[in-house]
Amino acid sequence: MINSKMIFRILGFLLLIETAMLLCCEAVSLFYKENDLQSFLISSAVTACIGVLLLAVGKDAVKSLNRRDGYVIVSAAWVTFSLFGMLPYYIGGYIPNVTDAFFETMSGFSSTGATILNNIESMPHGILFWRAMTQWIGGLGIVFFTIAVLPIFGVGGIQVFAAEASGPTHDKVHPRIGITAKWIWGIYAGMTGTLIILLIGGGMSIFDSICHAFATTSTGGFSTKQASIEYYHSPYIDYVISIFMFLSGINFTLLLLMFNGKIKKFLHDAELKFYFICVSFFTLFIAVWLHQTSSMGVEEAFRKSLFQVISLQTSTGFVTADYMLWPSILWGCLVIVMIIGACAGSTTGGIKCIRMVILFQVVKNEFKHILHPNAILPVRVNKQVISPSIQSTVLAFTFLYVVIVIISVLVMMGLGVGFLESIGTVISSIGNMGPGLGTCGPAFSWSALPDAAKWLLSFLMLLGRLELFTVLLLFTSDFWKKN
């Protein structure tokens, strides 16, 4: 059975966290003396009241969680945060359409970065800060943060962690998942703080530095400028953000091992090697092609290629160039890196490198099986045998990912969206990327899409952020059976 009282209690606590986030934005509004203060006051009051109400409903809840509770909490947390997170946009009239307001908020909390705004610079500082904060909190995971505070309720966090981190993961670095969560959040905050200082040193204002650091370490991609990072025309900023996007694409557990002195394990990790090789190959290929077919110099071609490959492979979505103006073969390369994604256990989207490593090993073994039918060929990653159950899960995930993309593209086309735009927006949404292709590419917002398309894409953002099974499981009849 579902422990509904405990779920309500935890969601109430999460809404109080969201209230605190809204209060931070109120402070920004007060500092800049802009007209968005009232929308944040009303939003925080509504959110706090509902949070307290849910806490009251969950009073005297049984202090236990099972796996089913974990899946419900994770999915409900993202939807609930987005529903209340849209209030400042909607109440203040900055995004007067409910569909657009929810889309923008889900894009933030899922760290996608797709936007319907056409004049970002006209927005008040409080609203821009809210956009950045939704990504920073959503990046590493609202629920992963909650794991660190679940002991307040007298329950463990492993069930919630199992639902939120559904992909192949590295070994635990601490037997208590709450301690691991706190350590990883420490690294996350430390990287963000370091990047803020470096961006200020590169000439960004303090406000822009904070917002872009939030969007970088969360691999979200919301910028305070309509032209994104291209606005600054700074090689220094391009390289600094490229480095931190790459770091944010690494498994945070692996980063924690590195900080604990296990450098050898870090450097010899199979997924990290695949990630590095993938970024290197596509960066060099695109850089050479740009240098040969345009007026770009070697350094500029390399820098723009490096930035765009890392940005899309890590699902950040920042841009320093309109890649739709590049040769069409390079669009294909960028779509490939969007699909692959970075490392599992990071803030990124896509299929993830560890799954690609396992799939390559499975395919390689199949060729050997054809020649040697009786041979026993285990799939190994980092010298560890990957069990048949994990192989099956990876294959099922990849198949489901492809099927959802195909069906969603067809639905988008049925709604009147062009073929190129349908492919771009669907892959971008389910991979939590941000920019798409065609008229939904890096130079445009997604405001022109039909409302039905925006709801579909919002759902795909949630699916991609929680890696498919966590959400889709709720739609199966077996999940709700009492046994």
Image: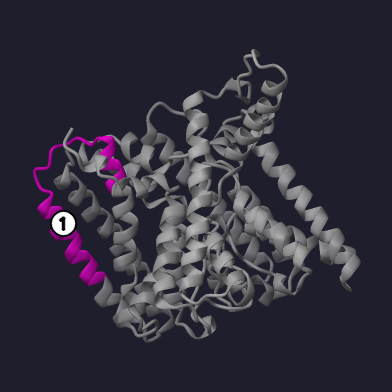
Q: Nearer the viewer, residue 398 or 112?
A: 398
Left or right of 336 in this view: 255: left
Using the rendered image of the protein, determine whether residue 297 is visible from the camera's viewpoint.
no
User: Is residue 174 among the parts visible in the rendering?
Assistant: yes
The N terminus - image quarter: top left
The amino acid on which the numbered mark 1 sits, given as a three-letter code, is Leu
Where's residue 178, x and y in %? 36, 36
**Residue, x 37% and y 67% (percent of image)?**
24
Task: Relative to 369, say whether 309 is above or below.
Answer: below
- Tell me, yes or no, whether the highlighted magenta stretch contains residue 372: no
224 relative position to 22: left or right: right
Q: Which residue is mark 1?
A: 54
In this rendering, position of residue 377 left or right of residue 152: right
Q: Residue at x 21, y 43 (%)?
A: 480
Q: Position of residue 95 (x, y in %)?
A: 39, 81
Q: Is 416 placed above or below 10 here?
A: below
Q: Secondary structure at mark 1?
A: helix
Image quadrant in which the C terminus is located: top left
| Residue at the (47%, 53%) spot, across then down | 464
Q: Colour scheme in the image? A: one colour
Membership of 55 in magenta stretch: yes
Give how far across and how far down residue 187 sits, in percent. Answer: 52, 45
Q: Which residues are magenta?
A: 44-72
Residue 223: x and y, percent?
Answer: 56, 71
